[in-house]
Amino acid sequence: MTKILQRNLYREVADRVGDLIEHGELAPGERISEKQLCERFGVSRTPLREALKVLAAEGLIELLPNRGARVVKLTVKKIKDTYDLMAALEGLSGELACQRISDTELSAIRALHDRMMGYYQERDLAAYFKANRQIHESILAASDNEVLQEMYSNLSQRVKRVRYSKKMTEKFWAHAVKDHEAMITALEQRDSHRLGQILRDHLCNKLDLATLEGVVAFDDEPEAANS
Amino acid sequence: MTKILQRNLYREVADRVGDLIEHGELAPGERISEKQLCERFGVSRTPLREALKVLAAEGLIELLPNRGARVVKLTVKKIKDTYDLMAALEGLSGELACQRISDTELSAIRALHDRMMGYYQERDLAAYFKANRQIHESILAASDNEVLQEMYSNLSQRVKRVRYSKKMTEKFWAHAVKDHEAMITALEQRDSHRLGQILRDHLCNKLDLATLEGVVAFDDEPEAANS
DNA sequence: TTCGCTAAATTTGCATTCATAATTACTTTT
DNA sequence: AAAAGTAATTATGAATGCAAATTTAGCGAA
């Protein structure tokens, strides 16, 4: 039962503008020219403006009345706040997953976990990351809470463009692996409280503030919106 | 520093359509006629359609391609899921508030709490509810996490139209009051873990599934979206 | 009567056009 | 030359118009 995906022009445009933001082609704080984007995508202003409204509601851009759209500037605080939230949501997903997960879902996650451990042994970082992502997504899916999933993916979208240095240290990696061992144990024991705790802490580790400082432009006041 | 509030037609329309949904004037699952709403508000289709896009992004309505907009049907499961999420967010707000709250904010909440207890003694339900809401909002504000606040108010919007019977029983009320006593204690002790726990459990109590069953129409499949 | 097909009417999606606000460029004044 | 005020330009906000899809109504056959 896959979600019905609507292919409207405005949705298409919103996705593509989102990509531009993610890949930094639209700079943070930069004023988004409607005309320019219209020409780029070959659409009229109507669907483009609808797309901008949606992106604003999703938190990727902000709309200043009569003054156009701007890409939201990600400050360190904003990223930190978003990660705090995502950690809480991951925690909840773990708790719910423990209560609701089916045996087939569980064994699928176990298989993913074992595969991932193999990748760790081989030091195959790319494969490890992929399996890792799949595990977290599977737990989220097993939580069987659509609102939660929707909100998580929205938050994830917002910080997607932050690409902190991916040079995982050995120590860091070992720690993450240890987390995952504890995770699968808690999940198989249906220890919801414990899995929740692990997942909350686990995500916090992912956000290394030190590396972050260099990536995000400035942490000054978001905008001098008032005249 | 109040948020700059944009007064665009589309935002105005979105708010008013939101009100219509909240007050049940637009029935769940009902097809929303663009023309009808345009005439009602005296605006053209452009801002109305933009408003619908935003409302869809906010989760109040859903847009079917070429088939118009529908008010999202709230099933018992969806409401339950939303409350689970809100509970997690309230918990997080408590944890963060403990870490970040200032003394002046704290004493303001203490004052609110004491006032609320007075209303409880007098059995002034309306005043009690108002103070209660203010306390929760204050904690949320003290958490100093804008993303969290935004998400919480969005979720709260979604379930606003669910008005379960407000006949608070004595026992129930006493329990809530007890929760609040524990809350203010934990907050003053800056016991973040404990306050988080209390807030998570507290909200769960608010959602009485028994009373809910009668209010929400049906809990059948959300929609037969596929042909 | 019920089912299926076809055509009219309605509704949605998008482009274009008009009005208004903001920005830029230019002129004038000190 | 710098600052300030004004006109020209550009961008945004909203309304209208047109094409395509969907829904509704009407008709005929089983």
Image (cartoon, coloured by chain):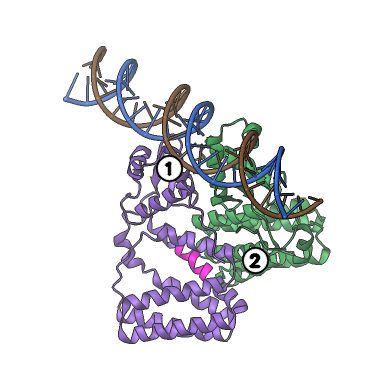
Chain colours: A purple, B green, C brown, D blue
Q: Please state which of residues A174 and B139 is positioned toward the viewer in this rendering.
A: A174
Contact between labelled residues 1 and 2, with CB atoms less than 8 Å apart: no
- Would you say residue A84 sits in the magenta stretch? yes
Residue assigned mark 1: A48
Point out the stretch of residues depicted in magenta: A82-90
B223 versus B45 height, above or below: below
Left or right of A155? Residue B200 is: right
Amino acid type, callout 2: Met
Instruction: Residue B12 in the image: state x and y as whole percent.
Output: 58, 38
User: Would residue B106 be seen by someone viewing this image from the given angle?
Assistant: no
Q: Secondary structure at mark 1?
A: helix
A182 versus B117 height, above or below: below
Q: Secondary structure at mark 2?
A: helix
Tell me the residue at 50%/63% (across/down): A152
Query: Dot 2 surroundings within 10 Å: few (below 14), some, or many (20 or more)?
Result: many
Left or right of A135? Residue B40 is: right
Residue B183 - label: 2
Which image quadrant for residue A66? Answer: top left
Instruction: Residue B110 in the image: state x and y as whole percent.
Output: 64, 58
Q: Quadrant of the C terminus of chain B?
A: bottom right
Query: Dot 1 surroundings within 10 Å: few (below 14), some, or many (20 or more)?
Result: many
User: Would residue A36 be seen by someone viewing this image from the given angle?
Assistant: yes
Amino acid type, callout 1: Leu
Q: Please state which of residues B86 and B174 is positioned toward the viewer in this rendering.
A: B86
Closest to the camera, between mark 2 and mark 1, is 1
